[in-house]
Image: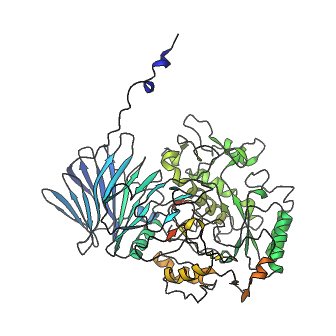
Amino acid sequence: MEGSEAIRPDKHGAAVPETWKSIGSFTEIEQRGDVFICRAERGGAAALFAAPGVFRIKFFVGGEADLASTIAIDPAFRQKTESGIQLEETVDRLVFRSSILEVEIEKTTFIITVRDTEGQVIVRQTGISFSPRGGASAIYDMPQDSHFYGLGEKSSFLDKCGERYTNWNTDVFAPHVPEIEALYQSIPFLIHMRDGRSCGLFLDNPGRTEMDMRSHGMAYTMGCSTGAYDLYIIAGPKLKDVVTRYTALTGRIQLPPKWALGYHQSRYSYMDQQEVLDLARTFREREIPCDVIYLDIHYMDEYRVFTFDPVRFPDPGSMMKQLRDMGIRIVPIVDPGVKKDPNYRIYREGVQQDHFCTKLEGDIYFGEVWPGTSAFPDFTDDRTAAWWGDQHAFYTGYGIEGIWNDMNEPAIFNESKTMDLDVIHSNNGDMKTHEELHNLYGLLMSKATSEGMKRHMDNRRPFVPGGLCRHPAARRRLDGGQPQLLGAYGARDADGSEYGTIRPGLLGSRYRRVCPSYIRSTACTLDTDGRILPLLPQSFFHRYHPAGTMGFWFGDGRNSSEIYRSSLPLDAAYVQSVPAGFVYGAASNPSARTGISGGPEGDKSMRSVSAGGFGSRGSGVPAGYGSSCGLSAGR
């Protein structure tokens, strides 16, 4: 005997394909101050100029236009518009003219063409369509001489032409090969270069987005699976003009604390207090520069955040004092997963005060991470963000002024590698699912960490690696990114590169040839060995920060200079004498991969690993929405 389950609809009949539809033809226009609402048969778009050279268009299906933006946009720009826009309407088109751009919308097809002041087409959107389930995808002209840059941390070519990428913060331990489309951070910011001119396209959507420069012949697409299609078109004509306008829109990095501009030492992992102290003493005895040591998860009591293991780290206060006497700071790792344990204060408070992510029905969402079954703070709630930030008084009480945020893609030990998509975020009263806000989680965690540290440090600047962005902390940023401020200090002389990528931290003869060719900065001079003095990061910052661009600096493993003293020769015999466990390689993000800031236009032989965007962790990851260090200055 069978029940109704035997005739479930999904067991019978062919699947019905989804029909994607456009918004139809133009019907009318309404002007609200400096905002133009262009209505169509099945929706429309709100158009405005956010600043000179920055055109924003946000599409909607049915209903009304909502001009709210994500926190990727600097607060100064969220309500800002360029005034004095000229509108010309004819029988078949609308034309908007600003001081820098001209935007034309064809009434019948809703094709959008953007031109610069010389009348050159910089962007042409030939159509946008919407799925019945909420996705959207737009198609753009891609002339034969097109080159594409940006998108933050992608393990592939510097020129993205002919490639396809997904922006979805993902904890990918290995491999980091060109075929991996999504990594730790997401920056849905694409730079299109052709005929010597550049323009930028930034899709302000913290859900899953895709950029496809591979599948459509002489066209490329930018799409999202959920949420709004909120597009910023950013004028050039030079690439640096695009980056300058983009970083003004999304926010620029803040000056890190002076102590962070040194050599950083990190590995997985230091198992006890004595090992950390022995490591520090060995650095000093061997006169190897070291300013910071990172503590990975083993310093915690069974991986409970905001604790020290009472057996392995019995006297953290004494350890901190001894390290500080040697001139070394500690940066401990902090993950978002809070161990499920009713005797653990952080978990108990989080449950009692409703700080954890839940399902719609109210049940706390639990996932497996390092501590085992864990709950996760809902950083989209300002109340929870403040609570989390205040927990860092635990660390500042020991004199700690830097925190390494990690695992905040968020990473979960399950098949999807992250939270269930139907987890609910309160979002300060505007409830959203995790599917809609995934790429924001790490940014918000780092923001809460940075702000909390600052409150408990008498307003001094904290160091939160992975996010020297507008909030000087985001490991996974929504849309900016962290330039690699701190150089790669390598006692390696390898001519090969990991998975074919160019990593200047691996300083061999190949890299000494590459660096002078590809890093074109008047702020520095590379000598014949490719060395740049370690003092240059601060110089680079002061030179490039006002424009929103940033360079790199590198140390030579065979002849490295410490910040405060003269060069120390490290010949091969000396390097071989260093004990096992020393990791040569230092960066502001202890596990970040270092990218390079530029290359000859159109050179697709160069590959890059890092950049900035929506992200989370300090492992070479979304600034955009995300978590990494990057080749472009961002938030």
**Which residue is at the front of the view, 35 or 330?**
330
Specify the farthest residue to the left: 91
Left/right placement of residue 53 relative to residue 94 reads: right
Specify the farthest residue to the top: 1
Where is residue 125, by image quadrant?
Answer: bottom left
**Which residue is at the front of the view, 231 or 214?**
214
In percent of width and height, residue 106 lies at 20, 56
In percent of width and height, residue 501 lies at 55, 68
Left/right placement of residue 204 relative to residue 401 reads: left
**Total numbered labels:** 0
Q: Which residue is drawn at the image coordinates 36% and 72% (left, top)?
A: 198
Observer able to see residue 565: no
Left/right placement of residue 587 relative to residue 305 reads: left
**Which residue is at the front of the view, 93 or 165?**
165
In percent of width and height, residue 562 lies at 70, 83
Where is residue 552, by image quadrant?
Answer: bottom right
In percent of width and height, residue 363 lies at 61, 36
Q: Which residue is drawn at the image coordinates 85% and 67% (left, top)?
A: 318
Instruction: From this view, report whether residue 157 is shown above or below residue 574.
Output: above
Observer able to see residue 365: yes
Identify the coloring.
rainbow
**Which residue is at the front of the view, 217 or 395?**
217
Instruction: From this view, report whether residue 634 is shown above or below residue 217.
Output: below
